[in-house]
Amino acid sequence: MKALAMPTLALRWSVLLTASLLGACSSTAPYHSPSLQADQLTTLPSARAVGVLESDTPLALWWTQLGDAQLDALVHLAWKNNYDLRASVARLASSREQLQAAQGARLPGVTLGAEASHVRLAAVESRSGVASIADPVQWQASMAWELDLFGRVSHSIEAAQFSADERAALSDDVRRAILAQVVETYLELRGAQMVAANLQQQLAMQEETLTLIRARERAGSVAAVERMRYEGQIRLVGSRLPGLHAQERAARNRLATLTGQRLDAPMLALLDSPVPLQLPKAMLADEPARLLLRRPDVRAAERAMAVAAAREGIAQADLFPRVSLLSMLGGAGIAGDWLGSEAGRWRLGAGLSFPLLDGGARRAQLRAAGADMQVASANFDKVVAVALEETDSALSNWTQARRRNEDLNTAHSLTQESARLTRIRYQEGAESLLGVLEADRTALAANEQVALARRDLAIATARCYVAMAGGLDVAEVTKQ
């Protein structure tokens, strides 16, 4: 009976190991990236009102359409010095080093140890049978190499690789966000400058009219109350300038932070001189599939799914044994006699670690990894939906901003001409001062609305291109 015990036990372990191997072969399905086919995605309704982007049409340097070389310099400086971007680049470098560390698990691990001491040996420890002073020395080199039979090591490397890819995409998304912030802050600065310039121009014209009113007051043809009413309107208009200058300063300070410069940097001082914005006459919209493939937040969400799938594979592999090859070479002896054949020792074998009882912890970890995969999948679907929403809304806002800008330009021309003719009529005595006041107020409001409409149209243009991830190819050149 005892003779049959060992083969029966060995047979049982062989069956158990075979079942484990078969189970590992069907542990997890390989990960496949979700398909982003054009026929499976929703269309962009607002894209019908704009031009279609050809496959070879670049989105790079779209901000140069605004006609200010200083903006281009600010964008590239932000991509180089921005604090958030520097942190993002450091996180990307960290993830790449973690990938290098994970790849090291493919190779055998070798450790070397040595020990030397000066001791008094008792009689029973000494070779001569007499107590003596000796210098024992021992050393050994050990090697352990895990065989990746169930994919734990390969899934760990995949998780590190996909995590590095996710970090790279997130870094690109930081560049996209910085581009949006720099351009919008710059446009807010230029918008404040345009409104201030229009107010100053209007104040100069009103001062000329006030001079005429004072002359008529001295001649007795105009009452003092009319002069005070008109002068009060001029003061009200002028009171808006400090607020606009404060907006301009706040925008300039924000640009300093975004570009990593001092608040008194010479480049920022160059922004004191207003530059008229050159608004693009057309907008190009991309098809949803190409748009989503270019968006870095979509790429990051897809890579997060890949990371979750790899970690699920790791959790699955932890259910099975870990098999390693082990070896050791070393020696031990008294100083001067520890390298001989008598002092040498070696070991060669294999080790197996099998989780038999763990209270269901590994199964729970596997279920948790599966839930994390579902979270990543839901987040990917959300990011895709938000990307399409942002792009369509940006295109719609641009279309409406362009129409508003066109209507206000027409209204501006009419109100300016009306104010000019009203002043002429007032000089000729055919118009009352009340009519001049009303004409000036209307012209001033139209001036301000036109300036703000130009700024809003430029911002709407920027948001469209940012939503379509334009300019990131230039960022790749800047990173290098």
Image (tube, grey):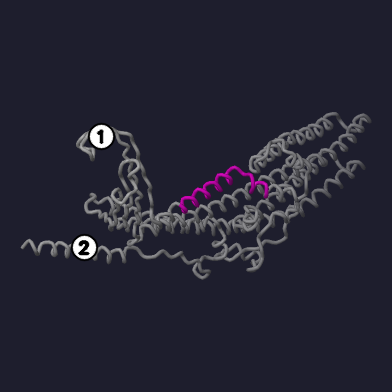
Going by the picture, which residue comes out furthest to the left?
1
Sequence-wise first label, 1 or 2: 2
User: Which residue is depicted at the point 9% across and 64% down?
Assistant: 4
Could you say which is closer to the camera, residue 126 or residue 276?
A: 126
Could you say which is closer to the camera, residue 167 or residue 135?
A: 135
Q: Does the magenta stretch include residue 296?
A: no
Residue at which label 2 appears: 16
User: Which residue is depicted at the point 85% across and 36% down?
Assistant: 207
Circle 2 Cα neighbour tier, 10 Å, few/some/many (<14 / 14–19 / ≥20): few
Question: Where residue 364 sits in the image (x, y, percent)?
Answer: 29, 52
Determine the main secondary structure of the stretch shown in magenta.
helix
Question: Where residue 339 sits in the image (x, y, percent)?
Answer: 34, 48
Residue 286 lies left or right of residue 326; in this view the side is right
Instruction: Estimate the spatial distance between the alpha carbons at disc 1 and disc 2, rounded to whole Å.
Output: 50 Å
Q: In this view, does 202 lie above or below 23?
A: above
Question: Where residue 392 sits in the image (x, y, percent)?
Answer: 58, 59
Residue 238 lies left or right of residue 107; in this view the side is right
Residue at which label 1 appears: 121
Residue 316 lies left or right of residue 411; in this view the side is left
Q: In which quarter of the image is residue 126?
A: top left
User: Which residue is depicted at the point 62% across and 63% down?
Assistant: 285
Going by the picture, which residue comes out furthest to the bottom?
39
Q: What residue type is labelled 2?
A: Leu
Q: What residue type is labelled 1?
A: Leu
Q: Is residue 98 magenta?
A: yes
* Number of callouts: 2
On residue 131, which mark appears? Answer: none
Could you say which is closer to the camera, residue 56 or residue 141?
A: 141
Q: In this view, does 94 lie above or below 130?
A: below
What's drawn in magenta, residue-wise?
Answer: 76-100
